Each structure stands twice: as structure tokens, then as C-alpha cells.
């Protein structure tokens, strides 16, 4: 894969996952090439990679659009996240070190501050980093590869943007329970809390769509 293609891929992916372009937005090769400062060939390569990650879709005329998901797509996405992140939490509970635990505690204080100020962007940043520490602590490159495509989907951002204060507060409390499970090295507890955490996020998203 060329460096130009990697650059285009990173820029377009960032625009999609960061909600720069909403669901269904057209992605025109010429516009993307100008944006990324590359020719159209690397853009085509980048779009093929993004299509394989289900971040974009193509119509019958081969035009590309930011993907949107049906209710069934979203339900499956969250089900897979619950399964995989629950397993990651269980593994992390028996492998996490003191430095990572301290970082989880710091990040959850950042989550609390974001909740208090109502700053959804700060919440998303701290929340993403919190889950990344848990995944890193699971020490499974295979699991990390499978989860990356799920946790970076734009639906994750849209879920948080649908949260009210009660959901933010509950998320912080669930993070605190995960930290307690990590301190106790209790894999079953950690897995249970994580599965519930993801399932609650799914229902918050689903309720907001209705």
C-alpha cells in the first residue's frame, strides 16, 4: 500500500469517524483527492479499504457514500462489541498492571469532569482512551484487531451525543465498577460489568432512534 493511499485512508477515515461527514454523505473522488493532496488513484485505494470496514457503501453506479446502518446493523454491532469487549475486560482483569490501573482512574476522573461540565467531546475523548487502556491490557493483538473496526464506528459517537446527564453519570459509575473489578483481579465481574455497559449504550442509542 502506497504512502499516498495510507494518507488518504487516514484522512477520510478520520472525517467519517469524527462525524465530519454524516451518514449518507457523498464521497467524491475528486473532492477527496484535493482535500488529501493526492491523486485520485490513492483515494480509490483508500475507499476500497473503507468499504471493507463497512464505513462507506457504493451504489450501483459505483459512487461512494458514508455508510448508514439499519436497526439490525446497529443491534449486531453492539452485540459483537459486548461479546468482544466483555472478553477483553475479563482478560485485562488478570493482566493489568499498576500503571494502567492508575491511568484508568485518571481517565475516569476526566469522564467525571466532562459529565459535570456537559462536554460531550471531552467525554468521548476520555471514554475512548479508557476503553483503549482496557483493550491494551487484555494483551491480545487478535482481539484488538477485531474490536478496532467496531469501537471506531461513527455510531459510537452518535450514541454519546444522544446521552442525557443520567446516561453520562451511569457510564462514569460503570467505569468505576470496572476499575474495582480490575483491582480485585475478578475476570467474571469485569466481563459482566462491561457487557452491561455496552448493552445499556445500545438501548440508549436505540431509544433515541425511535
Image (cartoon, helix red, strand yellow):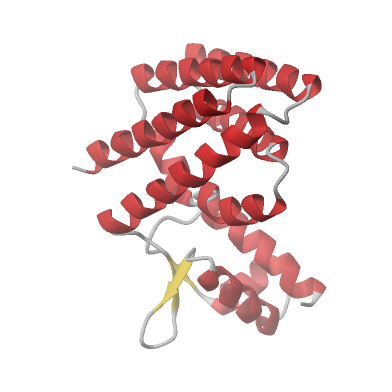
* Rendered-image quadrant of the C terminus: top left
The residue lying toward the viewer, choosing from 110 and 11, is 110
Residue 162: image quadrant is: top left
Say whether residue 118 is visible. Answer: no
Relative to 28, say whether 10 is above or below: above
* Rendered-image quadrant of the N terminus: bottom right
Residue 206: image quadrant is: top left
Question: Position of 156 compared to 135: left or right?
Answer: left
Going 36% across and 87% down the picture, which residue do you hit?
60
Say whether residue 120 is visible. Answer: yes
The residue lying toward the viewer, choosing from 94 and 151, is 94
Residue 110: image quadrant is: top right
Q: Single out the residue that lies furthest toward the left.
A: 210
Going 41% across and 18% down the picture, which residue do you hit?
170
The residue lying toward the viewer, choosing from 19 and 33, is 19
Could you say where residue 148 lies in the image, as x and y percent from the top left? 60, 52
Could you say where residue 12 lies in the image, as x and y percent from the top left? 61, 63
The residue lying toward the viewer, choosing from 14 and 78, is 78
Relative to 23, say whether 208 is above or below: above
Relative to 14, say whether 100 is above or below: above
Question: Position of 55 compared to 96: left or right?
Answer: left
Could you say where residue 48 lies in the image, as x and y percent from the top left? 57, 77
Question: Position of 119 compared to 107: left or right?
Answer: left
Going 73% across and 28% down the picture, which residue do you hit?
96
Q: Single out the residue that lies furthest toward the bottom.
A: 61
Relative to 79, say whether 166 is above or below: above
Amino acid at each position: 500500500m502506497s504512502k499516498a493511499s495510507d494518507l488518504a485512508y487516514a484522512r477520510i477515515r478520520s472525517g467519517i469517524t469524527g462525524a465530519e461527514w454524516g451518514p449518507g454523505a457523498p464521497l467524491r473522488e475528486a473532492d477527496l483527492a484535493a482535500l488529501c493532496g493526492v491523486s485520485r488513484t490513492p483515494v480509490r485505494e483508500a475507499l476500497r479499504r473503507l468499504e471493507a470496514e463497512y464505513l462507506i457503501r457504493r451504489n450501483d453506479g459505483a459512487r461512494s457514500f458514508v455508510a448508514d446502518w439499519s436497526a439490525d446493523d446497529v443491534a449486531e454491532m453492539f452485540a459483537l462489541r459486548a461479546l468482544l469487549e466483555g472478553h477483553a475486560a475479563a482478560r485485562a482483569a488478570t493482566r493489568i498492571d499498576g500503571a494502567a490501573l492508575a491511568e484508568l482512574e485518571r481517565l475516569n476522573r476526566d469522564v467525571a469532569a466532562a459529565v459535570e461540565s456537559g462536554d460531550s467531546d471531552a467525554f468521548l475523548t476520555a471514554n475512548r482512551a479508557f476503553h483503549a487502556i482496557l483493550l491494551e491490557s487484555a494483551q491480545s493483538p487478535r482481539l484488538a484487531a477485531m474490536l478496532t473496526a467496531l469501537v471506531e464506528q461513527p455510531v459510537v459517537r452518535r450514541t454519546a451525543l444522544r446521552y442525557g446527564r443520567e446516561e453520562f453519570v451511569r457510564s462514569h459509575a460503570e467505569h468505576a465498577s470496572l476499575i474495582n473489578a480490575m483491582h480485585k483481579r475478578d475476570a467474571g465481574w469485569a466481563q459482566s460489568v462491561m457487557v452491561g455497559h455496552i448493552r445499556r449504550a445500545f438501548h440508549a442509542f436505540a431509544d433515541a432512534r425511535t
